[in-house]
Image (spheres, rainbow, N blue to C red):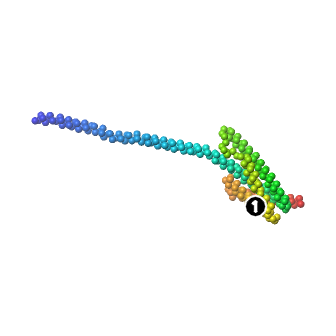
Amino acid sequence: MPAVATAGAPQTVAGTLTAESVAATAPQTALAPESAPASAPETAAPQVTDAASQAVDVASQAVDVASQAAASAPETLDGAHEKMNRLRAGVLGANDGIVSTAAVVLGVAGASSSPQAIIIAGMASLVGGAISMALGEYVSVAAQLDSEKAALRRLGREPHPGELVSPMGAAIASFLSFVVGALIPLLAVALPPVAWRVPAAFIATLIALAITGYVSARIGDADPKRATLRVVIGGFLGLGATFLIGHLFGMIVS
């Protein structure tokens, strides 16, 4: 009987060893879940790569849009440059027409009360001044155009549409604006009665000079009040001096 019990002990030991062998395999089973997080980076890596690729694509599109905007900007700016050139010529022409014609008619009015003489002098000043102003503007802008072409040749590129200034456009704008400006003092002297010719010409001329001074200040991004006041004061002094000189010469001649 004891021998039988002793013979059964190895079975118990063997059972124990079998449990230990099972326990020995447990770490392998326990370590298996740790392999799941290891696969997470492999799954996230393609997503990060895709996001980076999309970001690069968006940046490339932004660069393309910026390049197109930069390429189209010179045309817009150059067109504005040409318009500004014509506007500048127009304002200068109108200002010269106002001042020169007003000075002539007021000078003649100071020397003579004949309406025929005043109108003839004013018309002569209008026609001669407009032609002279247009020719001077054409020559000036043509010289500027030659300089711009030479600069473009040195840069080795062709001009954009509307980039170069137009001498003919500036001359036409100067001619027409001079005529319009000269008509203001001429009509102010010709239409009113004799007693009101000089005051009307002074008032109309100063108002017109205030308008051109304000417009020129807006174009040049200057202080409109200061520029307008400067032009009005200068015009008043010039017209007053011209009238007095004409009056003195009229007294001497008569």
Give the x, y percent position of residue 235.
76, 58
Q: Which residue lies at the image location 69% right of the left edge and 45% below the top edge?
A: 164
Residue 62: image quadrant is: top right
Quadrant that contains the N terminus? top left
Quadrant that contains the C terminus? bottom right
Q: Amino acid at mark 1?
A: Ala
| Disc 1 element | helix
Q: Which residue is mark 1?
A: 204
Residue furthest toward the right? 254
Q: Which residue lies at the image location 40% right of the left edge and 39% below the top edge?
A: 42
Q: Is residue 235 left or right of residue 56?
A: right
Q: Is residue 49 left or right of residue 175?
A: left
Residue furthest toward the left? 1
Asked if residue 150 is positioned above or below residue 175 in the image, the reply reads: above
Give the x, y percent position of residue 87.
70, 52
Label tally: 1
Give the x, y percent position of residue 120.
83, 57
Asked if residue 246 shows in the view, the reply is no
Asked if residue 80 shows in the view, the reply is yes
Dot 1, how many residues are within 10 Å of its Cα: few (below 14), some (14-19), or many (20+)?
many
Give the x, y percent position of residue 70.
60, 45
